[in-house]
Image (cartoon, grey):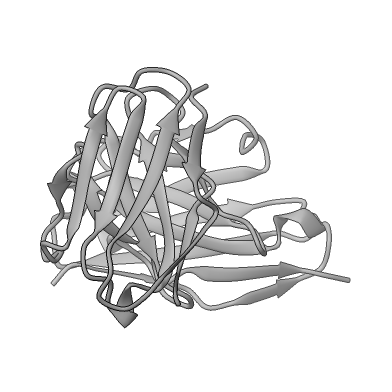
Amino acid sequence: QVQLVQSGSELKKPGASVKVSCKASGYTFTSHAINWVRQAPGQGLEWMGWINTNTGEPTYVQGFTGRFVFSLDASVTTAYLQITSLKAEDSAVYYCARDFPRHFVSDYWGQGTLVTVSS
Amino acid sequence: EVIMTQSPATLSVSPGEGATLSCRASQRVGNYLAWYQHRPGQAPRLLIYDASSRAAGIPARFIGSGSETDFSLTITSLQSEDVAVYYCQQYLKWPPKLGQGTRVEIK
C-alpha cells in the first residue's frame, strides 16, 4: 500500500538548519511528484511547492524561496525538505504528499513533521 | 493569485443531519477544485477532486459540486468521524491555493 513516512519532530534554535525526510513506498516513486504543505500553529494548510521526482527540479511558492530547499534521493525513494537560517515563524507541521490524480492534488500524505524553533 | 474563501468558519451539525460547506474562488478555476478533510492529529485526506469526483475509498455521503467560482461540499448524514476541518483547494492556476478551512463539529 502507498505510504509516506516522515522523520520525527525537531527542536531547533534560531539560525540553525533542519532537514525533514519523506520516505515513499508502495508505488513507483518517479511516477508522481511530491508536494510540500505547511501548517503553522492555529493556522490552515499552506502550499509550499513541489518537486519533480524524475528530474529533481523543485518549484517554490512565493514566500518559500531562498531558505527552503526541496531535494530527493530516488535510489531510496525519499524526498527532503531543508530549511536554513531557521526563524521562530518557521515553527509548524510540515507535510509531504504524493501528487495524484491531478497535478497539484495530493492523495496520500505523510504523517507530518513538527518543527519547533525556539531559543 | 487565486484567493479561496470558505464559509462558514465553523459548522455545528447534529449526528445524522446534513452539512453543506461553501468555497468561493476569486477567479474562475473551471472544475479544478479539490476538497480535503483534516482530522485532529492526523494527516489530511483527499475527499474530492475535479470538483465532484470522489477519491478512492471515500464514502458516498461526501458530495462535491460547483464550477468556476462557486463550489460546495455536502456531507449527508453526518457521522462522528466526520468531525474535522475541511479545506478546498484550486489547482488550475499557479500557485495552488487552499481556503482557510471550515471546522465541522457535532452539535
**Residue drawn at (59%, 71%), measured in percent from left and top?**
A114
Given the current orientation, which residue lies at the most extreme top position? B28
Quarter holding the C terminus of chain A is: bottom right
Relative to B61, is A104 on the left or the right? right
Q: Which quadrant of the structure image shows residue A108?
A: bottom left
Relative to A83, is A52 on the left or the right? left
Quarter holding the N terminus of chain A is: bottom left
Relative to A115, is B50 on the left or the right? left
Question: A105 above or below A113?
Answer: above
Q: Closest to the observer: A53 or B106? A: B106
**Residue drawn at (59%, 77%), measured in percent from left and top?**
A9
| Residue B7 placement (x, y as % from top left) | 49, 45
Question: In this rendering, does residue B26 appear at all?
Answer: yes
| Residue A116 placement (x, y as % from top left) | 71, 70
Q: Which quadrant of the structure image shows residue A10?
A: bottom right
Given the current orientation, which residue lies at the most extreme bottom position? B80
Q: Closest to the observer: B32 or B66? A: B66
Q: How many marks?
A: 0
**Residue drawn at (52%, 21%), measured in percent from left and top?**
B1
| Residue A80 placement (x, y as % from top left) | 46, 56
Question: A44 above or below B31?
Answer: below
Question: A96 above or below A53?
Answer: below
Given the current orientation, which residue lies at the most extreme right position? A119
Question: In this rendering, does residue A86 appear at all?
Answer: no
**Residue drawn at (36%, 75%), measured in percent from left and top?**
B14
Q: Closest to the observer: A5 or B61? A: B61
| Residue B31 placement (x, y as % from top left) | 23, 28
Relative to B100, is A12 on the left or the right? right
